[in-house]
Image (spheres, rainbow, N blue to C red):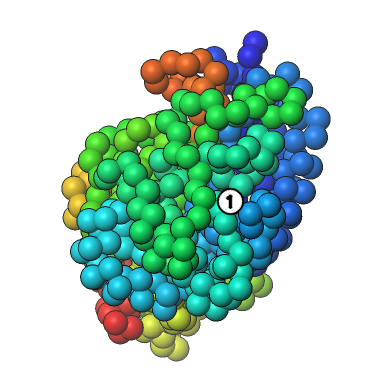
């Protein structure tokens, strides 16, 4: 039995799964935490990854890493870290994104160039922030990697040429999924000079080996890995509820949205992955539960005890600013509060509806660029709360499917590793590899919920 490993190096933690390369059967898994924050010393990721790999990789033949998108890891000419990595959720580069958009000629110019319009999260915006705020660090920067690129590069023994894949590269703002080429002029526009970038490999390419002889795949971004782990296909819209919220779909054509709502990413299998991202997802529920002094399960029970619409109470959950819509300095707000509706049940319901409201808008944006949903796949930590699927059914007009809980990013990375190992034209099928029931919520849309959310949102812009 050949074994493969997949790593999910996310904002909050690192997870590793080891699976049978042919069947996908789970053999073992492990995890370790990452430090909180919007900038992190990459050494913390290395330490956590080393911890989870210890004793887990016995007999593993191939490995790939799925990592948080967009983060900037700047290295000097000796391959040493120049400054702590800026993560996707660091919004200090918002004005730099605006400047870059204007300097190239506006949103349409960026959509045509790289399929996406930069916002604070994108690597190119963070590079510009460093050039503006820390010019000495920018001058020292000789190589720019993303978090998963950096970890793969270290595991491969720090080769002269680092590796990445189409999916991860498409989130930088200086690689085009439309042409399949870097736009080095855009990197230079942001940094002030050119720098070494990782080579973009195909999804089934072996890019090197670890010191123990484990074959390395190119890895990918976390959303791309999740799509691969789920086996998402045409008509599937994945709504992922982790630290951030994302809605994405596999497509045969690249997206170019000059509004900047839909990022025109590539996926991890040779197709495209139009995606909308919000900053606020699972932590909306944990923050509301903490305020009410209850656990997450009780929060779900309270939400289900309230009627759809929460008695007229709407929550705009911009607790950490927001990415879509692009409101990095916004803050959360409650709308429609009265003495009658000010109950724990309504507040809990408003929190779930608020978290999902932005993602329902995200699915609408995907439809506007040509995605035709037939179902919504609801995944991520918050999807396990029993209220979330039930409330989602009132906000989407297609069935809401909640697959069994699983490490879909790590599973997608493992599936890529198996693909690399097999050398086949397609990734292994790995059907029904997770234990647990699939829950299906038939759509019961309540237009008043979306309408109230839209009115609250329009009060900000």
Count of labels in the image: 1
Taking 297 as reference, is 284 above or below it? below
Q: Residue 372: image x %, image y %?
A: 21, 44
- Furthest toward the bottom, the residue is 339
Taking 269 as reference, is 134 above or below it? below
- Taking the spot 27% from the left edge, 39% from the top edge, the residue there is 251
Taking 179 as reference, is 90 above or below it? below
User: Which of the image's four quarters has the N terminus?
Assistant: top right
- Taking the spot 54% from the left edge, 54% from the top edge, the residue there is 144
- Taking the spot 41% from the left edge, 78% from the top edge, the residue there is 95
Q: Secondary structure at mark 1?
A: helix
Q: Residue 448: image x %, image y %?
A: 26, 69
Residue, disc 1: 147
Q: Residue 10: image x %, image y %?
A: 60, 51
Give 331 or 449, whichever is nearer the viewer.
331
Q: Splitting the image into 4 quarters, where does residue 236 fall?
A: top left
Q: Is residue 76 visible?
A: yes
Taking 308 as reference, is 33 above or below it? above
Q: Residue 45: image x %, image y %?
A: 70, 51
- Give left or right: position of 217 versus 391: right
Answer few, some or many: residues within 10 Å of disc 1's Cα (few below 14, many 20 plus, some between 14 and 19): many
Q: Is residue 318 visible?
A: no
Give 213 or 388, whichever is nearer the viewer.
213
Give 71 or 81, whichever is nearer the viewer.
81
User: Which of the image's four quarters has the C terminus?
Assistant: bottom left
- Taking the spot 45% from the left edge, 88% from the top edge, the residue there is 339
- Give left or right: position of 46 versus 351: right
């Amino acid at each position: 039995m050949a074994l493969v490993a997949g790593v999910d190096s996310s904002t909050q933690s690192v997870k590793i799964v080891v699976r049978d390369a042919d069947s996908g059967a789970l053999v073992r898994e492990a995890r370790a935490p990452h430090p909180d924050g919007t900038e992190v010393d990459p050494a913390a990721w290395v330490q956590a990854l080393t911890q989870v790999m210890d004793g887990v990789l016995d007999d593993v033949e191939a490995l790939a890493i799925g990592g948080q998108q967009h983060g900037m890891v700047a290295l000097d000419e000796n391959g040493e870290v120049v400054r702590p990595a800026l993560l996707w959720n660091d919004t200090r580069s918002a004005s730099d994104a605006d400047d870059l958009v204007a300097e190239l000629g506006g949103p349409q110019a960026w959509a045509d160039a790289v399929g996406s319009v930069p916002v604070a999260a994108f690597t190119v915006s963070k590079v510009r922030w460093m050039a503006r705020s820390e010019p000495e660090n920018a001058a020292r920067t000789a190589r720019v990697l993303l978090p998963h690129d950096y970890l793969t590069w270290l595991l491969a023994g720090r080769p002269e040429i680092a590796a990445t894949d189409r999916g991860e590269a498409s989130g930088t703002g200086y690689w085009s999924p439309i042409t399949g080429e870097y736009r080095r002029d855009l990197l230079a526009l942001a940094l002030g000079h050119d720098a070494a970038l990782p080579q973009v490999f195909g999804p089934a390419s072996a890019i090197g080996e670890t010191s123990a002889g484990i074959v390395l795949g190119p890895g990918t971004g976390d959303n791309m890995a999740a799509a691969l782990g789920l086996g998402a296909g045409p008509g599937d819209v994945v709504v992922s509820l982790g630290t951030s919220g994302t809605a994405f779909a596999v497509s045969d054509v690249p997206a170019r949205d000059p509004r900047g709502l839909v990022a025109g990413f590539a996926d991890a299998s040779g197709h495209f992955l139009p995606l909308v991202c919000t900053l606020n997802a699972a932590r909306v529920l944990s923050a509301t539960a903490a305020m009410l002094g209850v656990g997450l399960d009780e929060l779900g029970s309270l939400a289900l005890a309230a009627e759809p619409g929460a008695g007229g109470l709407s929550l705009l959950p911009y607790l950490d600013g927001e990415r879509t819509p692009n409101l990095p300095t916004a803050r959360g707000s409650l709308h429609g509060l009265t003495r009658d509706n000010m109950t724990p049940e309504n507040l809990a319901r408003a929190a779930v509806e608020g978290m999902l409201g932005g993602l329902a808008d995200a699915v609408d944006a995907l439809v506007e660029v040509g995605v035709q949903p037939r179902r919504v796949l609801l995944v991520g930590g918050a999807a396990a709360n029993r209220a979330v699927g039930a409330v989602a059914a009132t906000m989407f007009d297609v069935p809401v499917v909640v697959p069994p809980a699983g490490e879909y990013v790590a599973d997608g990375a493992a599936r890529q590793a198996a693909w690399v190992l097999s050398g086949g034209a397609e990734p292994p099928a790995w059907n029904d590899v997770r234990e647990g029931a699939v829950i299906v919520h038939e759509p019961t849309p309540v237009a008043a919920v979306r309408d109230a959310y839209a009115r609250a949102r329009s009060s900000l812009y």
